[in-house]
Structures are given as structure tokens and as C-alpha cells.
Amino acid sequence: MRAVVCTKYGPPDVLQLMEVQKPSPKHDEVCIKIHASAVTASDIYIRASQLPLRFLLPMRLFLGFTKPRKSIIGMVLAGEIESVGKDIKRFKAGDQVYGITGFGLGAYAEYKCMKESDSMYGCLSLKPASISYEEATAAAYGGLLALQRVEEGNISPGQKVLIYGASGTSGTMAIQLAKYYGAEVTGVCSTRNLEFVKSLGADQVIDYTKEDAAPPVGPYDVMLDTAGKAKDSTVKEQCKKALRSQANYRSIDDGKLELSSKRLVKIKELIDAGHLKPVIDRIYPMEQIVEAHEYVEKGRKRGGVAVSIKHPTMPHT
Ligand SMILES: NC(=O)c1ccc[n+]([C@@H]2O[C@H](COP(=O)([O-])OP(=O)(O)OC[C@H]3O[C@@H](n4cnc5c(N)ncnc54)[C@H](OP(=O)(O)O)[C@@H]3O)[C@@H](O)[C@H]2O)c1
């Protein structure tokens, strides 16, 4: 099969498309024929491996010193179950699925084997029927990140909720989820994304690039920072000060992403009922993975960036 291999840590061109052995499922694994993956903030961290020293050493101990031990990277997938091991209960061949491979990586490939139960090596559920495989990748990554924080924030009807970083993969999902839970939502983004964030349902929008504008008027009950702690601005600090209680500031970087198939099922139900729509900025073919990483690394994407994986008509072995 074809897969994208990370030959060493470094810039996007360390990624190389090559022919590798197709995996076969163990008794407790499914084999997924992948139709779409995604380029996420997590993939950039793993490929570039440019972290402060205190994070770099533990991460390289875990993932590999000069290159990832699991050389096929990629954490998000959507595809079809090709075959199942004899102990598999939740899925059957032909099921359309979406999920996250976590530290199992391996989603930049034509096939991936993984367990059906949740662990740090992934979570899987049936894919929303009403969206494409590419859209499903943004639903899995952005949806899981956003739903976890929205649930932790106990967002309830009538609350004033502020989403900082509203235009990214998780921000676009967080806006829609907060509206679904009945909050009055303010989205914070840059000038070019103001109308877009309103179109997702935000009641008000704030431009974080206008530092000389009047400070945000609170008080807000909850602030979800979906941009991540590294992305700062004067307006972000002003937003924190407009919170009713500082304890209600929640960053997407506080604690690890929970790989939960239960949440994937909930996201699927919300999408298929029309309450939630994942946003895709661009779709790149797997052959252009380097260009896809170059684009995502700029940090300006709107929603998710998907990788489309086309299979040859004559299957590889
Ligand atoms: N806790 C965990 O386990 C875990 C796992 C994965 C990811 N994460 C975190 O989640 C973060 C978000 O990931 P994501 O994929 O949703 O983000 P993303 O899509 O990569 O974010 C891109 C968006 O961020 C906006 N942005 C850039 N700088 C900003 C700033 N200073 N203030 C406000 N918005 C800004 C950009 O909009 P403009 O172009 O309009 O500025 C762009 O739309 C990651 O960066 C990472 O920190 C955490």
C-alpha cells in the first residue's frame, strides 16, 4: 500500500510518499480502508518536533529520538472497514467509520489496523452519514477537542460564552456546540473571519487584531480558548478579565484530549440531525502532503485541512 513516511523530524519535506507493507488485522483489530485523513496541529508538532526542552525530551523518549518510531504519521482518519478480526463486536466489513488514531499514528496511509475499544491508541465510531469522508476528519478532530471542553465547561442555556480562536478546527465546532447548548455566544477571530464566524451562529464577534478597540463587555460565564495557549493577543487578556470568575477560563491545552468513541457517536448524531456542520478549508491529495503541511504550519487555516486518499483500481498487496 502507499503511505506517507516521516523520514526524520524536520520541515514538511521530510514527509515522503512510499510503498510499504499493508497491515493485516489481529483478532481484536479492524482494518480500515482510509479515504481521508487530515493535517492537524498535532501532526505538525510530531513532524517538526520543535518544542521547549522540558517537553522535547519526554516526547522524543516516547515517540522516537531522531524520527518517529511509528514512521507513518497522521492521527485522523475516515474510511471503510475492510475486514475485522474474529473478536470484533462493534463493526463489520463495509461500515463507514471515522476516528482518531492517537499515539498509534498511521493515518497517512491507504490502510490502518486498530482496536475497536478506546485507548491512547485511538477511538472509532460509525461516521456521520450526511457528510463526506473529508468533512468527517474535521468532525473527529475539531469535534472531539471542542465537545470535551464544552462538556467540562457545563455550558447551559442563557449563559454568556466566549470562544477565543473561533475560526480554527476546534473553534468552529465549539461555536456551534455552545449555540446548541443554548448559550449566547461571542466568537473572537481576526478581521477576515468575522463574517464567517457569524455565519456559524455567533451572536457577537470580536476582532482580536483591533487592539485599540473598546475592551470586550462581559461579564462572560465561560471562556473557551480553542486557539491554544501559544496563540496570544492583548484582546485575549482583556477577554479573561471580562470573565465572571477566572476559574471559568478553559484552554484547549489544559489536559490531554480524551479519545472517546462515546463523544464521536454524539458528534455523529448532532451532525446527522443538522445541529453541527464541520468546516473544511482545503483538501489536498495524499501526493501533496508536503504542501498540506506547509499550509497548515502557517497557522491561518479556517476549520480543518483534509487529505484525500484515492485507492488504485488494482489493489496493492
Ligand atoms: N489538549 C490536547 O491534547 C490537544 C490536542 C490537540 C490540539 N490541542 C491544541 O488545540 C489547538 C487548536 O487546534 P486547532 O486545530 O483547532 O487550531 P487551528 O485550526 O490550527 O487554528 C487555526 C486558527 O487559529 C486562529 N488564530 C491564529 N492565531 C490566533 C490568535 N493569536 N488568536 C486567535 N486566533 C488565532 C487562526 O485565525 P486567524 O487567521 O483569523 O488568526 C486560524 O483560523 C492547538 O494549537 C493545540 O494547542 C490540544
Image (spheres, grey):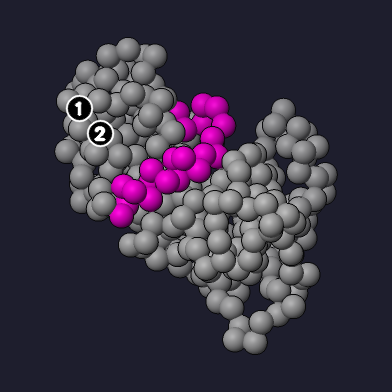
- At label 1, counting other C-alpha atoms closer than 10 Å, the crowd grade (few under 14, some 14-19, many 20 or more) is few
Circles 2 and 1: CB atoms closer than 8 Å: yes
Residue 177 lies in the magenta stretch: no
Amino acid residing under circle 2: Tyr
Q: Is residue 68 visible?
A: yes
Residue 172, compared with residue 254, is above or below; it is below
State left or right for residue 253 relative to residue 18: left
Q: Position of residue 144 (x, y in %)?
A: 45, 42
Vertical order, 219 against 192 (above or below): above
Q: Which residue is mark 2?
A: 181
Q: Give percent across and percent down for residue 126.
A: 46, 55
The residue that appears at 32% across and 52% down in the rendered structure is 271
Q: Is residue 271 above or below residue 144?
A: below
| Residue extent of the magenta highlight | 251-272
Front-most of residues 223 and 77:
77
Q: Which residue is mark 1?
A: 157
Number of numbered tags placed on the structure image? 2
Image location (x, y in percent) of residue 307: 52, 65
Give the quarter of the image for residue 173: top left
Report helix, strand or loop for mark 1.
loop
